[in-house]
Amino acid sequence: MPIRRRRPGVVDQSVPTATEPRRSGEASGGDSTSLTAGAMVSMKVPPSSAIVFSSQDALPDREEGAELKRRHYRNSNSNSSSASTPLIGHTPNGRRFAVPKTHDMVSSLFNPTKPKSHFDWVILFTLSLHAIVYLTFPAVWRWKFLLASFAFWRIAYNGGLGLILKWQSERRGLVNWFIRNGLLKMHYEDTGIADYNDGDDNNGKGPAPAGSASNPAVAKWLRQQLEVKMGPDYDFDAVPAEFNAWLLYRQLVDLVLLNDFFAYFFFCLCFVSSSSDMWWKAGLRQAAGWMLLAFNLWVKIDAHRVVKDYAWYWGDFFFLVDQSLTFDGVFEMAPHPMYSIGYAGYYGGSLITGSYTVFYVSLAAHLCQFLFLSLVENPHIEKTYERPPIALKLWRMKRLRSRSLSEEQSDSSMDNTATKGHDGSPGPTAKVPAEALALSTSFRNDLVIFKNLDLLRAADLMLVLLLLYGAVVPAVVYMVALRHSLTAQIGMLWLAVGQCLFWITFRTLGLGYILRRQSESQWVIRWFLRHGGTADEAFTSWRAIYNAALAMTYASFSLLALVAYFFNDKSREMASAAVITAASNTYADPVGFLGSRLLAPTLGVLLIAFHIWSSKSVYDALGDFGWFYGDFFVQNLPADRQKLAFTGVYRYLNNPEKVIGQAAFYGLALISGSWVVLGLAMTLQVANFLFLTY
């Protein structure tokens, strides 16, 4: 039977759900809207025995709605298809209100016909400072000043705005701060819930109503700044404090984001003439750069078309809206498009300028954006839109297992098999579904690569010893005693190559043969039963073997990359310190000399990071059961629960492990600069393709 990870397809299209909107393509929508989607968990499945658990089988509808948190909404806050139907928002304490229409930053700031607030004039002034610096400062200083400015605004974006959003998400801190200082008014009807701010900002009494402003002049000024930019449908006193706080936060966002962009733009202009490539190379580079810039522009425009102002400015950190979800446009191309392909312009600017300085600065800024996503956006999604159904499923499985074990212990302490009441008659006993019990007792925090490592568990300890003897000890011996001997280097290189070939063969052909026999005749389970074991022991043993093969594949490739790197070290000797110093003082491209040599290792590290992300995404979509090919071993599941799903990374790739599942090995090849590592990485790619296909 072929061992395939099929593209999950939506089977159940009748799940009523409700969620709220998200920014930049994350979860979105209203809690009063019925939606349809297959909220299920996909798994590694062969064509004829595909088993996937639908969250509908064990979770209530409200929890299934959380599976749609990664979907996207079409906010009718502006340009609505039905202008007569206002967008309805609701605050955390339940107050509902009509959301006034807002305008995007470009039209409100740069359209001379639109009224300007004092905030707008401050923003325009700070933007003009970057142009003044570029036009007036000496060439040797202006790029340094603009780089410092870009670093400041990038930190203000990912650090400053991120901390404010996290404070607001966890404690409603920003809204309560405005109210407590008398800058915004909290209506008395909005203070019915005492734990509105988790009891952190007002001694556990909730947000104190600002009956009289403690800063009346500032409060009046803020009110004027908001009213001058809003339309006739906006009433400062009628909307809740959350909406007004969001409008004020938007002013800060405009200041930071626009200055971040202008600083980067003028910084790139400093290096436009820094490259000395031949005309045809420069032409190709420029063409590719402009294409990336055009693509970036389209991504931003299309993303704003889908999410509109509400999600663009993180509106759901302040209040939620009733709105239908959509999965449209750029959000069908890539996960987190506003943070991934939405920064393609950074690399377009690097190509246009031909500057490694611009490239590494762009890369650092992009990584900061991913940190913002991981530390601010994703935790808010988890908090606001419930835990993912897969997490709830696993939690309930563990709870079932704990309950079953406690029942077994209580039963074993009695003489009779049935629990008896006071009158001697059989009493009620809790029944656990057979299929749920089979799954709950099969998984006991198994080792997944190095996750859930327990050195008191025999399989885990043996894996650690195998890694020590197979990779760590040889690497230490090579670095300490053998690296300076050419003969020893060649011998260690051949040893590492042989070990890689062994684990590639074992992981693909060996384990593929075992799975095929198990699929055809339950060979592994029959083997254990024949030798006095159980089916559960067979599955447990398989999981340990499969994980050991994965871990040793990574370890053997890492050892080979280390040996190959130092074997080729003399061919990549760096220039002398004097040459490096001279290059660093050259205005044309301060890091250009080193940048070209660091490019391949940098790309290698990025590929390794991409591999970690893709593997985690696959694991999140499949769970332990799918990751370890559980459908080959667990046979007592009803047919009505064998459903395919279309979720996670499988929305974008049919078989992610076939396409991007070996990215880390190509990254090691780039870091080591070895054709041998590259050849073995390609061998593993082909062998893994055959493993998953046949």
Image (cartoon, rainbow, N blue to C red):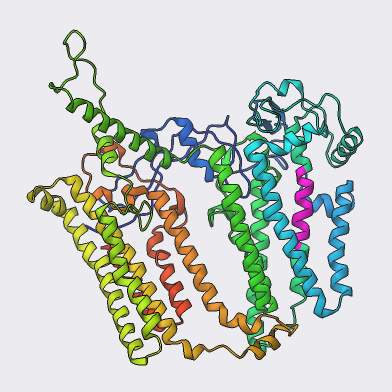
State the residue in front, 93 or 562.
Answer: 562
Quadrant of the frame with the N terminus? bottom left
Q: Position of residue 21 (x, y in %)?
A: 61, 40
The residue positioned 30% from the left and 30% from the top of the image is: 403
Residue 555 vs 174, above or below: the answer is below
Mark yes or no: residue 95 visible: yes
468 left or right of 76?
Answer: left
Q: Position of residue 480 (x, y in %)?
A: 39, 81
- Location of residue 513 (image quadrant): bottom left
- Location of residue 84 (image quadrant): top right
Q: Position of residue 473 (x, y in %)?
A: 33, 73
Residue range (magenta) = 249-261
Residue 414 vs 47, above or below: the answer is above
- 383 magenta-colored: no
Q: Residue furthest right?
A: 217
- 253 magenta-colored: yes
Residue 306 vs 297, above or below: the answer is above
Q: Position of residue 274 (x, y in %)?
A: 72, 83
Residue 325 vs 525, above or below: the answer is above
The residue positioned 59% from the left and 52% from the top of the image is: 373
Q: Residue furthest front?
A: 480
237 left or right of 521?
Answer: right
Quadrant of the frame with the C terminus? bottom left
Q: Residue furthest top?
A: 423
The residue positioned 23% from the left and 50% from the top of the image is: 540
Prevailing SS of the magenta stretch: helix
State the residue in front, 406 or 245.
Answer: 406
- Location of residue 515 (image quadrant): bottom left
Mark yes or no: residue 692 visible: no
